[in-house]
Amino acid sequence: MTRALLALLVRDLTLAARVGGSGALSLVFFLMIVVLVPFALGPDLNLLSRIGPAILWLAAVLATLIGLDRLFQADEEDGSLDLMTGAPVPLEGVVLAKVLAHWLTTGLPLALVSPLFGLLLALDGTAMLATALTLLVGTPALTFVGAVGAALTASIRRGGLILAVLVLPLMIPTLIFGVSASEAASSGTVPFATPLMILGALSLIAAVIGTFAAAAALRWSE
Amino acid sequence: MRLTVDDLAARRSGRRIFSRLSFALEPGEALMVTGRNGAGKSTLLALLAGRLKPDAGTIAVTEVGEATLPECLHVVGHRDGLKSPLTAEENLAFARDLLGAARMSPGEALAELGLGHALKLPVAYLSAGQRRRVALARLLVCRRPLWLLDEPTAALDTASQAVLAGLMARHRAEGGLIIAATHQSLGLDDARELRIGETASAPEAPVTAEAWW
């Protein structure tokens, strides 16, 4: 079972790195949004550094959606999903491996480069590190919530927009606690750890519910 | 393994495809499923593969230990389950690791189908017939007793059809089962034939009210 899931994980990572994969794409999209915001706001560094964490988080939410619509759809279309149904692993395991691969190619790189992008938003060192940490803890929640939408829209052509409409409202709690944790680090009205722990809890809850819900959605759509 | 299908009925989007379908397969037996287009050949295979739920009836397997039916079978159909950016070798190695019960290396399996040279080529560069042969090579990399083949000879040249016939004969000699939906003879000796559309009951009122609401 471990071997099958590892094979799936490696395959998805390889696919993301090959031509047409969405690996680097979401990172570039993330950069684009972060670059556009200072142009729109004008040269007000104080304003920029105050809303910087919020911008990084919004950009991360949107960048997570890139490639998410193809998470199960690509496998549904070419029959790979039928192959996985016949594998001696539960569908929940398949979902978990695929979501993990998606997070490793989207959420993790976003969190890792966010300090660099924080420079563009005039964040100071503490805020940069705090935002990176919250993204690291919070992006799994985004991916798992998104996976449920991806599973629901797997058999719908052009399901990307429906997916966004479905999952963006569900990402609101993660966004709220992500931004509040990043801001708590610099402003200091609430201890940093409190919203961060809630964010971690959200990720864990999303991991459990998202895995089972996505697997149920895939079974139901067949 | 033994496969027993009893009184099977299928319904898709409210429309009855076939009903009262019964057959049994013993080790080494092959079944050719024939019928006009849309008679439900692919639906029958999807039911067996566990992708669709039967409307009525039962599908039972025995002598397979604790494995479920979807874990005992290979499917080769229109959707080949191959990823275009990956090489033929990577596709087959993935299938072998995912499905378990490895038997041959991807290289050996491809060589059997005369595609040894395509081992390191991305599947995107292959022709339709070559893609089909890579999908058929999956039958060889993992050992599974039941082969479900949906139009296996589609896009295959005559030489490859002969190779496929040889593989099927060997599989049956080892006690494997084959169910193939087809319009033409596959070179299966003494295969039984199941005609869908005639064995099934006379067409009922085809569209029931629930189809529309």
Image (spheres, rainbow, N blue to C red):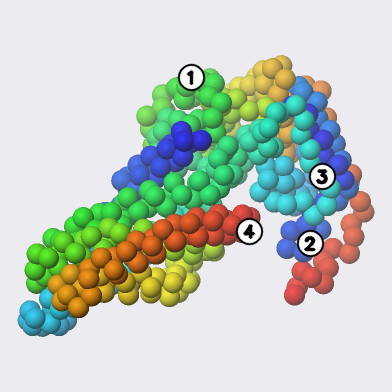
**Residue underneath mark 4:** A220
Crowding near the residue tagged with mark 1, few <14, some 14–19, many ≥20 C-alpha atoms within 10 Å: some
Mark 4 → mark 1, Cα distance in angstroms: 38 Å
The residue located at (41%, 33%) in the rendering is: B90
Judge left or right: residue A145 versus residue B37: left
* Label pair 3/4, CB-CB below 8 angstroms: no
The three-letter amino acid code for the residue at tag 4 is Trp
Mark 1 → mark 3, Cα distance in angstroms: 38 Å
**Residue underneath mark 3:** B58
**Residue underneath mark 2:** B15
The three-letter amino acid code for the residue at tag 3 is Thr
Mark 2 → mark 3, Cα distance in angstroms: 19 Å
Crowding near the residue tagged with mark 3, few <14, some 14–19, many ≥20 C-alpha atoms within 10 Å: some
Q: Earlier in the sequence, mark 2 or mark 1?
A: 2
Mark 4 vs mark 2: give the one in front: 4
* Label pair 4/2, CB-CB below 8 angstroms: no
Q: Earlier in the sequence, mark 2 or mark 3?
A: 2
Extreme-right residue of the structure: B202
Q: Residue B108: which disc?
A: 1
**Residue A189 percent coordinates (x, y):** 20, 78
The three-letter amino acid code for the residue at tag 1 is Glu
Secondary structure at numbered mark 1: helix
The residue located at (54%, 60%) in the rendering is: A213
